[in-house]
Image: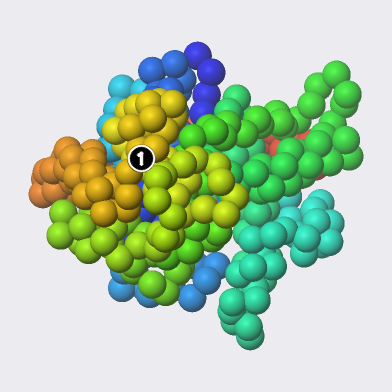
Amino acid sequence: KQRVLSGIQPTGELHLGNYLGAIRNWVEIQEDYDSYLFMADLHAITVPHDPTRLAESTYKVAASYLASGISLEHATIFVQSHVPAHAELAWLLMCITPLNWLEDMIQFKEKAVKQGENVGAGLLSYPVLQAADILLYEPDKVPVGEDQKQHLELTRDIAARLNYQFGREDAPILKLPTPMIRAEGARVMSLTDGTKKMSKSDPSELSRINLLDSPEEIQRKIKRCKTDPIRGLEFDNPERPECTNLLTLYMILSGQTKDEVAKECAEMGWGQFKPLLTETMITALKPIQDRYHEIMGEPGYLQQVLREGKERAEAIANITLTKVKKALGYALPV
Ligand code: TYM
């Protein structure tokens, strides 16, 4: 079986972008792959974080994976910081990564601007740790949202550089991963500005729907989300980014095709569409929320899942780490 790997940072609540851009796709393909899915808690401290909430967020994300339909029959779920090989390989890769590759990363530049003086070296090296996360497991595919594309390209560049500097042409050390970015849902936009992506770090709660939002919260957010004064709803009009975004959400969550939705909504006004979207969203999220609360209510269950996940992940990660250390000429412990 081929292998996939992906992860999410346990910072704040998961939102519809995380679900539609990542988790839902993991669920859809899981039967055809061995999946390695983790909580990127080492990445979570590259921006100022609250230590009283990190562990809890990590469990919540794990529960959200399971609640969304990830099955332990196909998937290994683990915590990044439980597998020390991630940090260790990240260091080795850091030493072969040119500084200007990191300075050019879009996400770094965006976050660095937001944080002013608070830019740690971790924020700059963030994508190198992500490269380590990926390369350790030699995945065939990495299913992510559109915003991770550049990090995936960097991962390939780092792997190719290591192979070139320390490997033989006929026996590459690291396997180059391929991103898997779905057309639909790869870039869910903010509810308050259709030109910005939905994000955990947007200060306005109204900008996003969280996976665990109550029906009342969903209703309130959709009611207040940004629209436009034009009658009739349509996809792909560049003047109407909010319209495309909301129709896309409706399309995915109702399981219809683009043509079906375009026809159904062509003559609608916002007053008719918003309640329809609200209902569809509430109905789609309800089963996930129910399972989530069941899982969180079962004492010891997640700990057990993560303990087993750590063991399985570590077994693979350590093999790759040893391979890299050998190639770099380390005296391995005997
Ligand atoms: P994070 O935690 O920001 O996001 C997790 C996943 O959700 C996707 N995503 C979106 N998709 C569509 N629309 C949006 N508005 C949206 N917002 C977020 C992201 O693309 C991602 O797939 N660097 C990663 C975490 C990570 C990782 C890895 C991922 C660390 N190591 C190794 C893959 C492989 C991140 O920041 O995700």
The amino acid type found where label 1 is placed reads Glu
Q: Is residue 182 above or below residue 147?
A: above
Residue 167 located left or right of residue 45: right
Please name whichever residue, 309 or 296, is drawn nearer the observer in this view of the structure.
296
The answer to whether the residue bearing label 1 lies less than 8 angstroms from the nearest atom of ligand 1 is no
Residue that appears at 38% across and 18% down: 31
Please name whichever residue, 107 or 315, is drawn nearer the observer in this view of the structure.
107
Crowding at label 1, few (<14), some or many (≥20) Cα neighbours within 10 Å?
A: few
List x then y, in percent, for residue 263.
Answer: 38, 30
Residue 240 located left or right of residue 39: right
Q: Is residue 33 above or below residue 316?
A: above
Q: Which residue is mark 1?
A: 267
Residue 297 located left or right of residue 166: left
Q: Is residue 286 above or below residue 274?
A: above
What color scheme is it?
rainbow
Residue that appears at 31% across and 37% down: 253
Residue that appears at 42% across and 40% down: 248
Residue that appears at 51% across and 28% down: 4
Residue 82 located left or right of residue 215: right
Q: Quadrant of residue 277?
A: top left
List x then y, in percent, for residue 299.
Answer: 12, 48
Q: Quadrant of residue 176?
A: top right
Q: Quadrant of residue 141?
A: top right
Q: Is residue 309 visible?
A: no
